[in-house]
Image: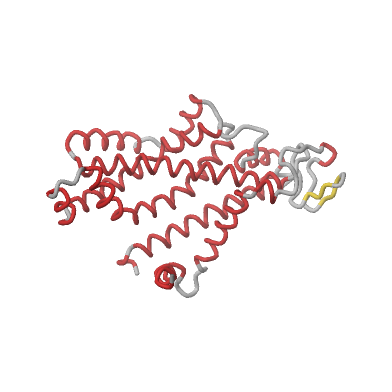
Amino acid sequence: MRSAIGKIRPFFQTRSGSVPVAVFVAIVAALVVVAIFAPLIAPYSPNSQNLLGRLKPPGTVARGVTYWLGSDELGRDLLSRLIHGARISLSAAFLSVMLSGCVGVLLGMLAGYVRGWIEIVIMRVVDIFLSIPAILLAIITVAVLGPGFINVVLVLALTRWPRYARVAYGQTLSVAGMPYVRLAHAMGAGRGRILSLHILPNIVAPLSVVATLEFGLMVLFEAGLSFLGLGVQPPASSWGAMLSVGRNYVSTAWWIATFPGLALFLLVLSVNLIGDRLSEFLNPKSR
């Protein structure tokens, strides 16, 4: 137990004068807890309307309802919608990262280890996907498949798997020539065993950094699609959809767009800084 803590402790040690990474880890952890227990934490139903309490500023009490962060154009509690929106944003980002990571890592390792025509086909497909702007590809694909939570997850995974494939391919090329990999092959180990037991554990570190940075990007992509009306559909709450509504009331109800924007800012900033710190921690040359 002590040895495990000793290995993790350097990750939280930052240079003097900089904000401790533990602060950003705490922010992400708090948002994850809020997303998991949203029905228990939210003071009201996110879809409960109160037309007499529409567009109320933060701290207003109307018909027995306290709007701690204000209300939207339909009198719905903004705090409750923000809490439930965290569940949608985080779950969409997590599922898309897992799906795109699994597909990209598998194809990248196959291309880097098997080589031959498999390498040529996979890497040319990767080049084609990477040549198209990811957000443009996501918008076109969602427009074809239709909006919805499942389609958003599939689209985000479809547009981002080449990033994992590229990293896994390069790392596999460097690991495949190691003596222990050649020895395992000489002793009759199959490709699946070599890839899963000898190559994958040695390329997890850079892939973890990519996944961390991609998580923040997936949050932004989901918010962008919802902002354009191509993501999760009403009445479900989504930070991007709340921003889309809030832009129409910036001058009269600033809180509708401000609080979801701050939540997105804090989450993406925290995840990116954790990813940067993780990259430094896993790369001995940067220490």
Q: Name the residue at the front extreme.
A: 188
Residue lying at 80% horizontally and 40% vertically, measured from the top left: 54
Q: Is residue 24 above or below residue 265?
A: below
Q: Residue at x 80, y 53 (%)?
A: 59
Furthest residue toward bottom? 16
Query: Picture quarter containing residue 5?
Result: bottom left
Residue 40 position in % (x across, y down):
69, 49
Image quarter in which the N terminus is found = bottom left
Residue in the image at 66% along x and 50% along y: 259
- Quadrant for residue 147, please give it: top right
Q: Furthest-left residue in view? A: 186
Report whether residue 122 is seen.
yes
x and y percent of residue 139 in the render? 49, 32
- Is residue 19 rendered to the left or right of residue 53? left
Taking the image as shown, residue 245 lies to the left or right of residue 116, namely right
Q: Residue at (23%, 44%) from the top-left corner?
A: 112
Depth check: 252 or 44 in front?
44
* Residue 255 in sight in this render: no
